[in-house]
Amino acid sequence: MTAALEARGVGVSFGGVRALDGVDVVVQPGEIVGLIGPNGAGKTTFFDCVTGLIPGEGQVLVDGRDVSGLPAHERSRAGLGRSFQDARLFASMTVLDVLTVAGERHQPRSPGVLKTLLGFDGIAEAKARKTAAEVIETFGLQAYRDKLVGELSTGTRRVVDLAGILVQRPTVVLLDEPSSGLAQREAEALVPLLQRMRADLSCALLVIEHDMPLLLDIAERLYALETGRVIAQGLPQDVVHDPEVVRSYLGDDPAAIARSGSTR
Ligand SMILES: Nc1ncnc2c1ncn2[C@@H]1O[C@H](COP(=O)(O)OP(=O)(O)O)[C@@H](O)[C@H]1O
Ligand SMILES: [Mg+2]
């Protein structure tokens, strides 16, 4: 089976600081994998490097295709999805328009003259609009489709962010703390949503999340990072009870460990 994402020997240095060193992460098609670790472990740096935002060492394959060395937008086009960070810029656009633009940006460009002569632009937009409408349905955003993004609650805007990734039809999606800044109820609502993302598009997810009960609800496997290295990987219950993980991440607080072992 060709992995959805295969990252081998990923290394990043910031000046003299070795932020990541020899990190191997593999995500199978349709799999939901969690990435945990204490603050400063290198989780976000790993995402930045894999998506091509910052340079680093190692090899990255998306659906078997080597994207190492490609710029971020080409990795995205190869099926590597990431959160739609520009959402703030589009506060004055409607949900439907934002999602249409997100999908359109992802389609191959046709030459300018052909576009004008043959109306390719219109075809691309109609296609993107149709996909946007489908994703709005999948995510239960119908009530918001004509609302301005700037008027939405943080929780709903987060859902629109996720929808903005989905319209790009990715093979694998990297999510950095999707629950951050959300109220407990909004965070809990992410669980069925992330599962639907996987089911409806059979896309794989690699999720950084500090809300351990939330992560344990969705993740089939975990990787634990500490100071730039993978210190444990495997089934979630094994990883959260791994002595080194308990020591490094969960600390000596027995309550924190008990909480992390329970699922909602
Ligand atoms: N742009 C940067 N310049 C210098 N050091 C950085 C930069 N980004 C992250 N770091 C350092 O790299 C390490 C890993 O950070 P980060 O990936 O943000 O950790 P995490 O997401 O696991 O909390 C930390 O020591 C952090 O200070
Ligand atoms: Mg981080």
Image (tube, grey):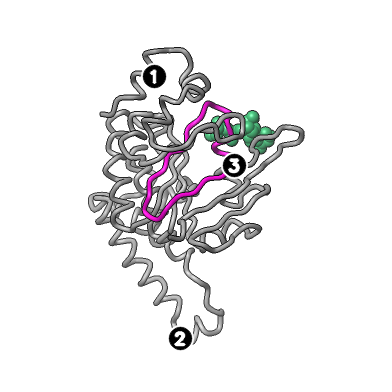
| Label 3: few (<14), some (14–19) or many (≥20) C-alpha neighbours in 10 Å | some
Residue 139 tag number: none
Say which amino acid is labelled 3: Val
Residue for point 26% across, 43% down: 192
Q: In the structure shown, which secondary structural element does the residue marked by tag 3 occupy?
A: strand
Question: In this rendering, would 218 be left or right of 64?
Answer: left
> Mark 3 sits on what residue?
23
Whichever of labels 1 and 3 marks the residue nearer the N terminus, that label is 3
Disc sitting over residue 118 in the figure: 2
Q: Nearer the viewer, residue 201 or 23?
A: 23
Of the residues shown, which amino acid type is indicated by label 1? Answer: Ile
Residue 70 within the magenta-colored segment of the rendering? no
Question: Mark 1: which secondary structure?
Answer: helix
In-front residue for pair 32/53: 32
Q: Are marks 1 and 2 in contact (CB under 8 Å)?
A: no
Instruction: Determine whether the beta carbon of the residue marked 2 sits less than 8 angstroms from the nearest atom of ligand 1.
Output: no
Residue 155 percent coordinates (x, y): 34, 38
Mark 2 secondary-structure assignment: helix
Residue 257 is labelled as 1
Image position, residue 204 (x, y; %): 40, 52
Q: Is mark 1 within 8 Å of ligand 1?
A: no
- Category of crowding for the residue at label 1, using alpha-carbon neighbours closer than 10 angstroms: few (below 14), some (14–19), many (at least 20): some
Q: Residue at x 65, y 50 (%)?
A: 58
Please tell me whether residue 261 is drawn above or below residue 109 in the rendered image: above
Q: Which residues are magenta?
A: 23-45
Alpha carbon distance from label 1 to label 3: 25 Å
Magenta span includes 38: yes
Displayed quadrant of residue 18 = top right
* Residue shown at 47% from the left, 69% from the top: 107
Residue 92 position within the rendered picture, expressed as x and y whole percent measured from the top left: 42, 50
